[in-house]
Amino acid sequence: MSLALQDRFSRIVDAKLRASLVQRDGFVWNTKFEGDPKAGAVKVPVRGEATVVSYDKANGATKSYTAGSFITITIDKDKAVNEVLDGYDAAAVPDNIVADRLDAAGYGLALAMNADGTAALLDAATVIGQSSATTKSNIYDRFVDAKTKMSKAKVPAQGRFALVNPDTMALVLKSSEFIAASSLGDEVKQSGAVGRIAGFLVFEDATLPDNASVIFGHPDWCCRVDEWAVDVKLQSLDGSGTYIGASAIQGRKVYAHKVTNSAAVYMDSAVLIPTIEEATAGGTTTITITGGTNTTSIKYRKGTVSDGVTTWGDWTTYNSASKPTASATDIIEAYGIGAGSVRSGIASHTVTAS
């Protein structure tokens, strides 16, 4: 197959992939990088603020150096399309079958990239802990709280996104503050967003686990790198030794996702914050940790305070059958883990041993 035809097939699959992605380039992920993804690693920029100084006409301005930097990310995903078309020689496959399988390849890759993007966002996100369930009456407050945190972290107001799981999307749609995409400009409609609320472009994303209600972020700190390692082509299988009179749609796509600043990505969790209680008897203080709604396991750690400095132990799985002990002024921190490995916010308790 000619290189021109391989390139055309790859561009057809890419077009379907881009159209099927919920987490679209430019709206959820940026695609700024240096290097060749096929080499296995690239450099991506970490956004930094420029230093602005006063200008003196006589002496000029004080020199400053860029606050931005580059980090290396490994291309850790390598996906293949290798779909056999039995009964068709490569030169005789009907155009409609080729078009259908290219379309299916683009859609399948979009599902995989969406899921992997969600995993990267969840792994890096700062959890917004909740002590009560999200409802129709407080869903707007959840968005405003995230907006406030991002503003304090100096994340630009323009371009913020919110990926919402289907159950939470039902609450968003019922909120009087929600503005549907049909009432907004063409750019919003082209992004695939369903609307806007509290300044966030809202995307319904079924790859979010049930316990991850919303992921808030900004594309400046969310990077996606992707490239065809092997362009898509229609490959004859006559020489395979196995297939006779068959061909296959084949191609390999490599990609990676990276959040370069966790302070720019937040996750509203349906795994509620645990509670921490102490009880002292016979001179020994024991700690009881109770998981919030949707918790399946609990992690905790103990900090000992000396001369104003806290030394933390490792995070340990909590076991109610052998409760940890603590002394006065110790600090206990704990968080819950729910289905899909979704975390709760962190609860903290300073021991009184009274």
Image (tube, rainbow, N blue to C red):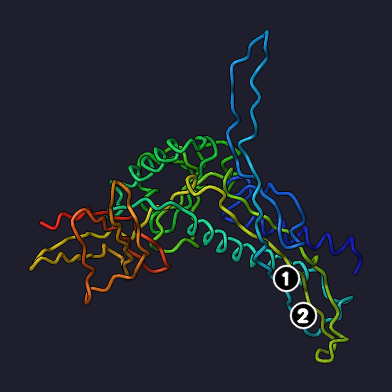
| Residue placed furthest toward the top | 58
Q: Which of 111 and 99 is in front in this view?
A: 111
The local crowd at label 1, few if under 14, some if 14 to 19, many if 20 or more residues have their Cα within 10 Å, is some
Q: In the rendered view, tell whether residue 33 sits above or below residue 243.
A: above
| Residue placed furthest toward the bottom | 242
Q: Is 58 placed left or right of 349 in the picture? A: right
The amino acid pointed to by label 1 is Arg
The amino acid pointed to by label 2 is Leu
Residue 118: give x, y in percent of width and height: 52, 59
Q: Is 242 placed left or right of 342 in the picture? A: right
Q: In the rendered view, tell whether residue 160 sits above or below residue 163.
A: above
Q: Do the residues labelled 2 and 1 touch (CB within 8 Å)?
A: yes
Q: At numbered mark 1, what does the secondary structure look like: helix, strand or loop?
A: helix
The residue at which mark 2 appears reads as 85
Residue 11: give x, y in percent of width and height: 78, 58
Q: Is 317 placed left or right of 158 in the picture? A: left
Residue placed at 67% from the left, 9% from the top?
Answer: 57
Q: At numbered mark 2, what does the secondary structure look like: helix, strand or loop?
A: strand
| Residue placed furthest toward the right | 2
Residue 168: give x, y in percent of width and height: 38, 55
| Residue placed furthest toward the left | 282
Q: Which of 30 and 233 is in front in this view?
A: 30
Among the two numbered marks 2 and 1 on one chain, the one whose residue lies closer to the N terminus: 2
Cα–Cα gap, marks 2 and 1: 9 Å
Quadrant location of the C terminus? bottom left
Q: Which of 246 and 303 is in front in this view?
A: 303
Residue 1: give x, y in percent of width and height: 90, 70
Q: Nearer the viewer, residue 114 or 47?
A: 47
Q: In the rendered view, tell whether residue 123 sits above or below residue 242.
A: above
The residue at which mark 1 appears reads as 101
